[in-house]
Image (cartoon, rainbow, N blue to C red):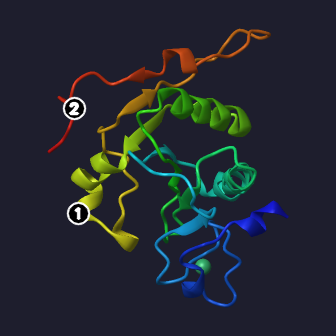
Amino acid sequence: MSENLLSDREASAHESRCIRAPSTCTCAHVAWIWAERPVTAAHPNPGKWMLFPSTEDVDRWWTVVQRLLATGRLGDTAKVAPSRGNVRTHLICVYLPDSDDVKEVMRVLLLLRDELDLRMGLNYKTDEETINGHYAASSGRNIQHDSKEMVSMYTSPRLVQQQRGQKRKGVSSAQRKLGKAAKSE
Ligand SMILES: [Zn+2]
């Protein structure tokens, strides 16, 4: 399958019986499972859409992300947090090379919404915000899944339930956050 084009930078740390599905990987030294294409493009201002699937959904969502990545419909990198004891929410990061390319960032938002049938609100963060934010204090197994973090470059509101037969929308209301007042540092 096309997923074979993708590499996992932590692959050597997975134990031999690990099947590398996020819901079942409990390998001690694996903070993330990665899916990466060979990098060719420049990354002037990298950032990521963040998805928070439940343990029930994470393997299916990750398979979809891998497929989209392998077929060139996302950026060139994504990662997912594997199983963490009793934690029931995972984090998938879908990276994009240029956060200032609003059209591209929104295209990927729409694609993810469509392919995963997402209704939850999504946040997009630049790597710069990540470095300055809560991520800096945590690493590896202590990552807090960002749920309390409000620092985002873009936010896409939750989709409201539409009348039957109506086409759902959402990306038109995705907004760029105003100012830097929300920054936490
Ligand atoms: Zn593993």
Residue on which disc 1 sits: 137
* Label located before the other in sequence (2 or 1): 1
Q: In the rendered structure, which amino acid carries the disc numbered 2?
A: Ala
User: Residue 182: which disc?
Assistant: 2
Quarter holding the N terminus is: bottom right
Q: Is mark 2 within 8 Å of ligand 1?
A: no
- Left or right: 20 in relation to 184: right
- Asked if the residue at tag 1 contacts the one at tag 2, i.e. Cβ–Cβ closer than 8 Å, the answer is no
Task: Locate residue 167, reporting x and y percent.
Answer: 73, 13
Q: Is residue 115 above or below residue 54?
A: above
Observer-nearest of 151 and 85:
151
Q: Position of residue 184 (x, y in %)?
A: 18, 42
What is the number of callouts on the image? 2
C-alpha distance separating marks 2 and 1: 19 Å
Q: Amino acid at mark 1?
A: Ala
For this orientation, the residue located farthest to the bottom is 16
What is the residue that sits farthest to the right in this orientation? Answer: 1
Q: Secondary structure at mark 2?
A: loop
Left or right: where does residue 183 sit relative to residue 157?
Answer: left
Seen in the image, is 74 located left or right of residue 136? right
Counting from the top left corner in percent of width and height, residue 147 is at: 37, 46
* 21 vs 176, nearest the viewer: 176
Q: Assess disc 1: are there few (<14), some (14-19) or many (≥20) residues with their C-alpha within 10 Å of its C-alpha.
A: few
Identify the residue shown where x is 29% and y is 39%. 151
The residue that appears at 63% across and 29% down in the rendered structure is 110
Q: Quadrant of the C terminus?
A: top left
